Image (cartoon, helix red, strand yellow):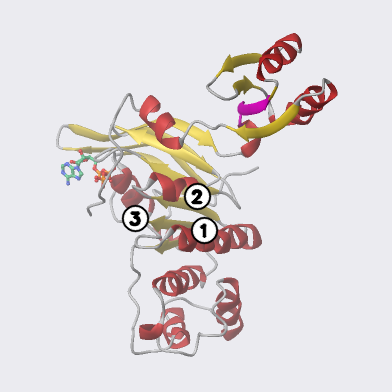
Amino acid sequence: MKPVVELKNLSKTIGKKKIIDDLNLSLYPGQITGFLGPNGAGKTTTIRMMVGLMKQSGGDVIIDGVSLRDNFEEGLSKVGVIVENPEMYKFMSGYKNLLHFSRMHKGITKERIDDVVRQVGLQNRIHEKVGTYSLGMRQRLGLAQALLHRPKFLILDEPTNGLDPAGIREFRNYLRRIAENEGVSVFVSSHMLSEIELMCDRIAVIQNGKLIGIREMSDAEQSFYYIEATPKEQVQQILVNEGFAVSPLKEGYLVQAQQQQIPGVVQSLIAEGLQVYAVQPQRKTLEDEFLEMTGGGQIAQSHTK
Ligand SMILES: Nc1ncnc2c1ncn2[C@@H]1O[C@H](COP(=O)(O)OP(=O)(O)OP(=O)(O)O)[C@@H](O)[C@H]1O
């Protein structure tokens, strides 16, 4: 798949300090990528270079084949940005806000406005004043606004600040459908591990201005399962005979297996006459993994601009 955005040896030096050090990262259409790092890792600086608010010292940002170094205006026309708490006119309706923003770009039709309103699920409330909207609705209106000019690439900075987990999931579902429908690549910067975990397909981790890891969030990757069955002592014997690595826990066992092997494991236990009570995937939490990757670096707790 051809990437929508490529960071190529992107670097930023301020004074003598290398703040971003040879960053290489590709973002793909339809995918939601999280950008995570400890305080001061360089997230804000990277994003500022990606949206043209700061000039790079070296390297380049390529958006949909256009280099920001060579063709700044054209490259930026392909970007949509949503900041924390998007600015909206509360005394105007959602629709009038979108109409207002649509005038900043050429060629946004009324049909396009209706289309983005539907995509963020605001069609029933769009003619009401923004002041009456919930936080979740205001965030979705921000999303609609950022989509108006059909960007290829959407950057969200702390998009769900203040939303509860249900609100984050709802926002994520809209975002996922939009990423797929519009083929847009989404980049989410957040200091909240749980938010990133709920929203993203993959996560890029940055520390000291360097990319230190990329993690895919696919469920199929889960490789440890907690299995509880009785009689307990037979579980280990059966599974070890089948070639699995098994570690005993208090009530059950931790078994190393791929997702597609699990139905077979359950069948073997049942065939031997065991009663199976639990089979649960055990994924290392993102927090564990993040701490491993950064060698104990703290998770960013605040995001100062
Ligand atoms: N104008 C500047 N002059 C000097 N140093 C700077 C400047 N801007 C940023 N830095 C330094 O660059 C590093 C990266 O900062 P940046 O704000 O990009 O990190 P961040 O990952 O966004 O952190 P946070 O999660 O705390 O917002 C920090 O050490 C910061 O002190």
The answer to if 228 sits in the magenta stretch is yes
Residue 304 appears in the picture as rendered? yes
Residue 75 appears in the picture as rendered? no
The x, y position of residue 123, in whole percent, is: 57, 82
The x, y position of residue 267, in whole percent, is: 81, 27
Residue drawn at x 54%, y 60% is 175
Q: Which residue is at the front of the view, 274 or 84?
A: 274
- Describe the element under mark 3 as helix, strand or loop: loop
**Kind of residue at disc 1:** Arg
State whether label 1 is within 8 Å of ligand 1: no
Quarter of the image containing the C terminus?
bottom left
**Kind of residue at disc 2:** Leu
Q: Which residues are the magenta region?
A: 222-229
Residue identified by numbered label 1: 169
Vertical comparison of 274 with 131: above or below = above
Residue placed farthest to the right in the image? 271
Cα gap from disc 3 to disc 2, whole angstroms: 28 Å
Answer left or right for 202 relative to 296.
Answer: right
- Check contact, mark 1 vs mark 2: CB within 8 A: yes
- Check contact, mark 3 vs mark 1: CB within 8 A: no
What secondary structure predominates along the stretch shown in magenta? Answer: strand
Residue drawn at x 28%, y 34% is 298
Residue identified by numbered label 2: 198
- Check contact, mark 3 vs mark 2: CB within 8 A: no
Residue identified by numbered label 3: 52
Choose the circle earlier in sequence order: 1 or 2: 1
Q: Quadrant of residue 263?
A: top right
Cα gap from disc 3 to disc 1, whole angstroms: 30 Å
